[in-house]
């Protein structure tokens, strides 16, 4: 029994050691967080990603905010983490849609090659849904759900002005999506098979806050 416990402890330690959580609390306010690079898919303003103090932050005191509200429809500001790359990842983030007349969206990016090639799953408080896309050569395409086909994602309650958590668990060509701990759907796709970076995403005039960006590489 003792040996089994030791093996389990070592495995758990390995998982925890492999995981990274970025809560932006050590970053300077008013600037892009350390080790992140901003980019833009589509048209319009690139986006303004800055660290801010926020009293509602899940982990005090700071959050990451995308504050530019250019309402160009095909506009997707990105904030990509530079120091991590993987094919199979378990990645999550807490997010709070604050405002936006056209969109109030928050997304997770993975297998990011460049600003025009990556996977993205996003939640939108104005549409109350979660959708997973591929962005290939700059073109965004929603992907069909396993067992349901192309439904434009899944309806789900995404409240404005409240914190929620979005997560994607990726293994090979299968992607499991969760919202607030509940599995929403599964997608199967093989467009991008190599490792890539992870990051955060918004759309159009979304003013969105992020905290506790967590990711780990899977075997």
Image: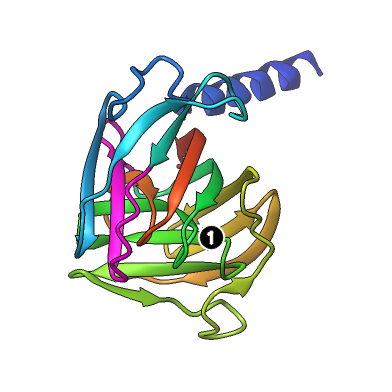
Q: Secondary structure at mark 1?
A: strand
Are there few (<14), some (14-19), or many (20+) residues within 10 Å of tag 1?
A: many
Asked whether 169 or 143 is in front, the reply is 143
Instruction: Locate the C terminus and report the quarter of the image it occupies.
Output: top left
At horizontal 65% and vertical 45% (from top left) the residue drawn is 162
Q: Quadrant of the N terminus?
A: top right
Above or below, comparing residue 83 to residue 182 in the picture = above
Q: Position of residue 78 (x, y in %)?
A: 29, 49
- Report the magenta stretch's main SS: loop
Among the 4 quarters of the image, the one containing residue 76:
bottom left
Q: Which residues lie in the magenta part?
A: 67-86
| Depicted 76 relative to depicted 74: above or below | above
Quick one: 3 or 96, which is closer to the camera?
96
Q: Position of residue 9 (x, y in %)?
A: 66, 19
210 is higher (above) or lower (below) than 53: below
Task: Give left or right: position of 99 versus 66.
Answer: right
Residue 131 falls inside the magenta stretch: no
Identify whether 25 is placed above or below 216: above
- At x 50% / y 69%, what residue is drawn? 131
**Is residue 76 shown in magenta?**
yes
Query: Who's the residue at 38% across and 28% down the image?
Result: 51
Judge whether residue 193 can be spotted in this image: no
- Name the quadrant containing residue 193: bottom left
Q: Residue furthest right?
A: 1
In depth, the one of 156 and 9 nearer the eye is 156
Q: From this viewpoint, is residue 169 visible?
A: yes
Q: Pinpoint residue 97: horizontal percent, then vertical percent.
A: 54, 50
Q: Quadrant of residue 199?
A: top left
Q: Is residue 3 left or right of residue 140?
A: right
Q: Position of residue 49 (x, y in %)?
A: 31, 38
Residue, disc 1: 123
């Amino acid at each position: 029994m003792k040996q089994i416990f030791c093996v389990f402890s070592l495995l758990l330690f390995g998982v925890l050691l492999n995981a990274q959580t970025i809560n932006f609390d050590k970053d300077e306010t008013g600037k892009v967080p350390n080790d992140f690079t901003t980019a833009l898919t589509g048209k319009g303003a690139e986006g303004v990603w800055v660290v801010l103090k926020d009293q509602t932050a899940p982990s005090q005191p700071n959050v990451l905010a995308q504050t530019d509200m250019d309402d160009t429809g095909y506009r997707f500001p990105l904030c990509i983490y530079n120091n991590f790359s993987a094919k199979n990842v378990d990645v999550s983030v807490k997010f709070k849609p604050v405002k936006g007349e056209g969109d109030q969206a928050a997304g997770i990016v993975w297998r990011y090659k460049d600003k025009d090639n990556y996977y993205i799953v996003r939640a939108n408080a104005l549409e109350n849904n979660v959708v997973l896309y591929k962005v290939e050569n700059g073109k965004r395409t929603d992907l069909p759900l396993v067992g349901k086909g192309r439904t434009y994602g899944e309806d789900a309650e995404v409240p404005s002005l409240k914190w929620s958590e979005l997560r994607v668990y990726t293994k090979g060509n299968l992607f499991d999506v969760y919202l607030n701990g509940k599995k929403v759907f599964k997608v199967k796709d093989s467009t991008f098979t190599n490792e890539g970076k992870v990051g955060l995403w918004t759309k159009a005039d979304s003013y969105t806050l992020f905290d506790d960006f967590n990711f780990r590489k899977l075997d």
